[in-house]
Amino acid sequence: MLRNAPKFHEVAKRIIEITEDCIIVAHNALFDYRILRTEFKRLGFTYKRNTLCTVELSKQLIPDQDSYSLGKLAKALGIPVSDRHRADGDAKATVTLFKMLLTKDLEKYIVTDAITLEAKRQIEPNHRLIIDSLPSIIGVYYIHNDTGQIIYIGKSKNIKNRINQHLTSSSSKSKKIQMQIASVTYDATGSELIALLKESEEIKRIKPIHNRALRRNAFTHALYEFIDENGYINLKIDSANGKKKHITTFSNKQNSDHFMFKAVEEYELCQKLTGLYKSKSNCFNYTLKQCEGACINIEAPEIYNKRVQEFIKKHSYSHQHMMLIDKGRDVDERSVILIENGIFKGLGFFNLNYQINTLKILESVITPMENNRDTQHIIQNYIRRNKNLKIVPIHNL
């Protein structure tokens, strides 16, 4: 394999060029970096770069693994490896592992340290250079000051355009950001749902100075159920109350009403028993022969309630064990949301060529996240808006 390969001195200049102002990431970085420095020393050149070791990062961010060798770690985490022990295969596997570690680094130690090192080399940020360096992809972005501190977190379907808006807007918040920005980092998500959940979680935890505190209720209204004196399940939209168990939540009254009108049509529900038509007798749809008469006790409760329960099961993931599968960051990748017993456990990514067939493998690729009313609202609202979202029960794993 090496018979026709170039000598080190023939590629040394190119290595210097492609690693300029970069941090070298490697699995067991100490070994690779030592080899590079030794070869450059033979040429009379002092080679210095900062390094990150995915072995040490894995021990910190993915504890309790049986082995931290690249092959065994890749197998445990569902990372496909082609051409094992060849430079190309191992490098691609290390890239995938590093992306996973960046996702699991909730405190952003990796990027913050990197920004701190870069900031020492720059005097004043060039806003155009920052914008030009960013991709037009969906994800979460982090605006840093010159010490590496995260001063603002946001999510966007087009990160480049959104940062451009921050740096050209004349709003008071944007002007403050423009004065303090030193660099922007980002997490590609591929999925709007992943971006929404990561943004919500990280604003709460990191509390950047230019993010307004999230309202305790990102939603104003919720859907509740109760059984009336005749045994019919009634549905009611009301102001969101964290103490009452709800089916799903809404950002405003208009969205909730629109949702309920569609539900009445799709599940053949009664307008009166869903709170959309106030009447002491039958609902309007019964007059049009579009209601079976639950409103005036003609349709049996057990028949009507069966349709209501089907509706509730679809729009409430309470007590359900499931995965939500959505788009990934690349064509051969998918994102996954894990929900156990109705509780949001976290999110992650997996390669399409690697089948998740055990709960242990699924949990190893998941970055744990907090379950709260905001995450419930985000997930339920996304499920309502995206009919093609793949929902997979996990009771068989």
Image (cartoon, rainbow, N blue to C red):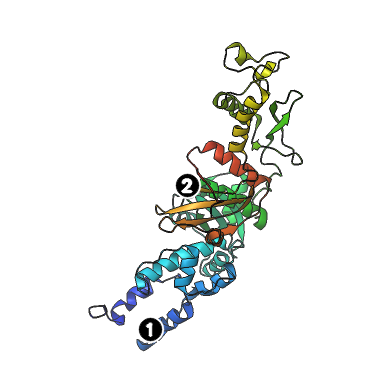
Location of residue 291 (image quadrant): top right
Residue linked to disc 1:
40
Label 2 sits on a secondary structure element that is loop
Q: Amino acid at mark 2?
A: Asn
Across the whole image, how many numbered discs are drawn on residues? 2
Q: Nearer the viewer, residue 144 or 335?
A: 335
* Outermost residue, top side: 287
Q: Amino acid at mark 1?
A: Phe
Image-based side of 208 in relation to 352, left or right: right
* Outermost residue, left side: 4
Figure check: 181 above or below 313 = below
Q: Report how far apart the C-alphas of labels 1 and 2 lie in the structure.
A: 41 Å
Q: Nearer the viewer, residue 235 or 182?
A: 235
Residue 354 % position (x, y): 43, 59
Q: Nearer the viewer, residue 384 or 292?
A: 292
Location of residue 85 (image quadrant): bottom left
Give the mark nearer the N terminus: 1 vs 2.
Answer: 1
Label 1 sits on a secondary structure element that is helix
Figure check: 289 above or below 342 = above
The residue lying at 40 percent from left, 81 percent from top is 36
The residue lying at 71 percent from left, 13 percent from top is 281
Q: Which mark is residue 279?
A: none
Q: Nearer the viewer, residue 271 or 39?
A: 271
Residue 385 % position (x, y): 53, 37
Q: Residues within 10 Å of mark 1 (few under 14, many from 20)?
A: some
> Is residue 26 something one can see in this rendering?
no
Residue 300 % position (x, y): 66, 22
Figure check: 123 above or below 389 = below
Residue linked to disc 2:
158
Query: Which quadrant would the N terminus be assigned to in this image?
Result: bottom left
Residue 353 % position (x, y): 40, 57
Q: Residues within 10 Å of mark 2 (few under 14, many from 20)?
A: some
